[in-house]
Image (cartoon, rainbow, N blue to C red):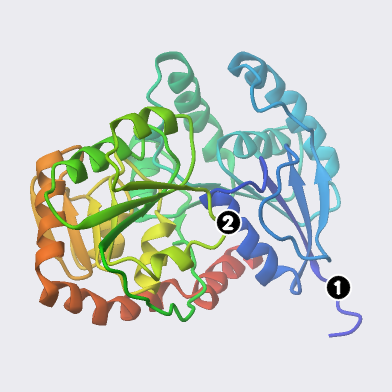
């Protein structure tokens, strides 16, 4: 309504590069920008996603991505103080991912009186494994996160981890949203397995490539994504493995595929599984913590992890890190047309819970509390 005073919302994230958390922020900006006065505060000038014109962009700093961890640690209080001054006229401060979350809390510790919401996008116990840096991050999470007014995790598994292992009480779960679109399927002469994700150790493309290499079938494996392991992975891949790089429109490739495969060792909440469901693809995923089981087998205990190959309501879950299980699941999907069809007709029904309007309503409720 004309003349209505809008709630002022500050959103802090490292960058708006090509990533899962960044994608969620881009959706929030689009959906909330006409309901709130929003300022987007970035720490790096990488911008991959479109930003609404009525959203003000502010840079807390323009950091060097190669900056050393010790320097980043020392700067946290300084950036927290700077952030406190930037958001002095805001009503709510919302941050995503570890460093922005720490800075958001430091602003509160330095006297910011506005509502502080932080969002954890991964499972800290599994994400922070390195000896020194991992211990520092875990300590910061344990000390700082409980100072927030609300901590939002993007899966039940991540919420459980924060509560059980970090003693954080004010945790809520909000799943990632998806814009449901028509995905026009096309046929290929070959059976196409496709996967999407950063080429790093956590996504474990090595397992997927090695499993695919051992299958004697008329198929291709398409890998969408980029990362520091690209050269190493290309060396072990056979000629039927295609590296497609980062793609802005993944649906054009999902539409041509016959099965989505996912080999992660751990996750926060894999948006790519929702994108695959949107294209009615059968899904094979490692039963990693957390996310895949909550998406593909919602009626089971999210804390369960299969030790073999498990056919569930909306896909197939396999044991984490097990090549033989992945091979078995891929052959099962490749050979069983009836099973593929069964997953295809169920896929769209599963997406209803993740519709943008349903998820945005949950965010609004917490922002407005």
Q: Is residue 296 left or right of residue 153?
A: left
Q: Which residue in the structure is indicated by mark 2?
A: 23
Q: Earlier in the sequence, mark 1 or mark 2?
A: 1
Q: Which label is found at residue 5?
A: 1
Q: Is residue 117 left or right of residue 200?
A: right
Q: Residue at x 28, y 48 (%)?
A: 240
**Which of these two is toward me, 299 or 241?**
241
Question: From what the image shows, is residue 229 above or below residue 2?
Answer: above
Q: Is residue 114 left or right of residue 200?
A: right
Q: Is residue 210 left or right of residue 158?
A: left
Tally the numbered discs.
2
- Quadrant location of the C terminus? bottom right
Residue contact at pointers 1 and 2, CB within 8 angstroms: no
Residue 146 percent location from the top left of the image: 52, 39
Q: Residue at x 58, y 69 (%)?
A: 365
**Which of these two is toward me, 70 or 338?**
338
Which element type, helix, strand or loop, lies under badge 1? loop
Snapshot quadrant of residue 189: bottom left
Residue 368 percent location from the top left of the image: 65, 67
Crowding at mark 1 (Cα within 10 Å: few <14, some 14-19, many 20+):
few
**Which of these two is toward me, 150 or 66?**
66
Q: Residue at x 50, y 32 (%)?
A: 141
Residue 344 percent location from the top left of the image: 25, 77
Q: Which label is found at residue 113?
A: none
Q: Is residue 46 visible?
A: yes
Question: From what the image shows, is residue 210 above or below residue 5?
Answer: above
């Amino acid at each position: 309504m004309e003349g209505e005073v809008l709630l002022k919302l500050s959103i802090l994230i490292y960058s708006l590069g090509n990533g899962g958390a960044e994608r969620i922020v881009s959706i929030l900006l689009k959906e909330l920008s006409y309901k709130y006065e929003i300022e987007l505060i970035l720490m790096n000038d990488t911008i991959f996603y479109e930003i609404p014109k009525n959203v003000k962009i502010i840079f807390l700093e323009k950091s060097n991505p190669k900056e050393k961890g010790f320097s980043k640690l020392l700067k946290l209080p300084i950036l927290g103080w700077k952030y406190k001054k930037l958001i002095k006229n805001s009503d709510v401060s919302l941050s995503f991912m570890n460093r922005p979350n720490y800075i958001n809390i430091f602003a509160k510790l330095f006297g910011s009186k506005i509502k502080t919401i932080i969002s954890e996008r991964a499972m800290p116990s599994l994400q922070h494994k390195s000896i020194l840096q991992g211990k520092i991050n875990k300590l910061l999470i344990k000390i700082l996160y409980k100072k927030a007014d609300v901590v939002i995790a993007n899966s039940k598994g991540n919420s459980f981890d924060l509560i059980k292992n970090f003693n954080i009480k004010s945790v809520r779960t909000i799943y990632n949203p998806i814009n449901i679109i028509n995905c026009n399927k096309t046929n290929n002469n070959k059976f196409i397995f496709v996967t999407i994700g950063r080429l790093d150790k956590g996504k474990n493309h090595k397992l997927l490539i090695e499993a695919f290499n051992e299958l004697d079938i008329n198929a291709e494996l398409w890998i969408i994504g980029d990362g520091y392991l690209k050269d190493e992975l290309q060396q072990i891949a056979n000629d039927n493995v295609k590296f497609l790089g980062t793609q802005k429109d993944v649906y054009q490739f999902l539409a041509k595929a016959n099965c989505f495969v996912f080999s992660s060792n751990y996750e926060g909440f894999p948006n790519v599984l929702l994108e695959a469901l949107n294209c009615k693809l059968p899904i094979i995923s490692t039963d990693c913590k957390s996310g895949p089981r909550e998406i593909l087998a919602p009626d089971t205990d999210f804390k369960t992890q299969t030790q073999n190959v498990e056919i569930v309501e909306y896909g197939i879950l396999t044991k984490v890190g097990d090549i033989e299980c992945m091979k078995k699941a891929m052959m099962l999907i490749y050979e069983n047309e009836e099973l593929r069809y069964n997953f295809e007709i169920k896929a769209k029904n599963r997406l209803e819970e993740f519709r943008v309007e349903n998820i945005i309503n949950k965010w609004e409720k917490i922002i407005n509390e």
